[in-house]
Amino acid sequence: MQKELITDATLVSNYIKGDEGALGILITRHKQRIYSFIYSKVYDKDIAEDIFQDTFIKVIRTLKRGSYNEEGKFLPWVMRISHNLVIDHFRKSNRMPKFSNSGEFSIFSVLSDSALDAEKTLIKEQVERDVRRVMDELPEDQKEVLVMRMYNDLSFKEISEKTGVSINTALGRMRYALINMRKIIDKHNIILTN
């Protein structure tokens, strides 16, 4: 059978069964697409090459461990690994936006820049996902005020009218929401880098 006709799923299965050459075919088949994706984010050949290598080291480890179960979706799975490694690279090189403790709403300043290049877009998506995960851990009343203020742009007067609490209570909930988010971010530092 010609190697072009062998599906990714078959090649993965063959590799797991001990056919080392199957991995070579998979790498050759998808190298251009994966490498181009990585390069489009880091704009540096050496770094892109390193991340590409790391991607396949992770692929090999996962396959050898027998914990691959992507049901034939090999390329999207590898792309996801490379995407996570790109984000890790930015985090390690301190090019991720930092959550600073100065200023009430500074945590959201990273979400408001509209002129974003490729790197910032990738980081922004990750930060937004992280922020949403953190928000999900807040008590419902704090989350409600936060969403109304940050995403719906309501004033505290409008929030107070909508929720039926005083402006001071709404302000207090916002303050506690931000304090709690910072605590959650500190507590989950490791989880947030996944």
Image: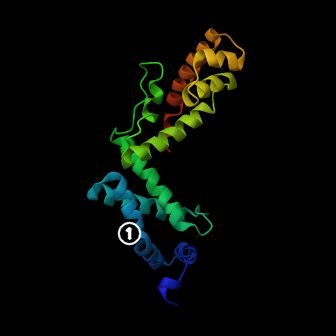
Local packing at callout 1 (Cα closer than 10 Å; few below 14, some 14-19, many 20+) is few
The amino acid marked with disc number 1 is Gln
| Residue labelled with disc 1 | 32
The front one of 18 and 104 is 104
Q: Residue at x 45, y 41 (%)?
A: 124
Where disc 1 sits, the SS reads helix
Q: Residue at x 46, y 74 (%)?
A: 26
Find the residue positioned furthest to the right.
Answer: 164
Find the residue positioned furthest to the bottom.
Answer: 1
Q: Residue at x 40, y 31 (%)?
A: 98
The image quadrant of residue 181 is top right
Total marks in image: 1
Please determine whether, in this image, residue 24 is positioned above or below residue 161: below
What percent of the width, then of the height, locates residue 55? 42, 59
Q: Residue at x 55, y 26 (%)?
A: 153
The image quadrant of residue 12 is bottom right
The image quadrant of residue 159 is top right
What percent of the width, then of the height, locates residue 157? 61, 14
Q: Viewed as shown, does residue 153 lie left or right of 34?
A: right
What percent of the width, then of the height, locates residue 125? 48, 44
Residue 64 visible here: no
Q: Viewed as shown, does residue 7 lie left or right of 57?
A: right
What percent of the width, then of the height, locates residue 104? 47, 19
Residue 159 visible here: yes
Give the colour scheme shown. Answer: rainbow
Q: Viewed as shown, does residue 180 lie left or right of 105?
A: right
The front one of 64 and 159 is 159
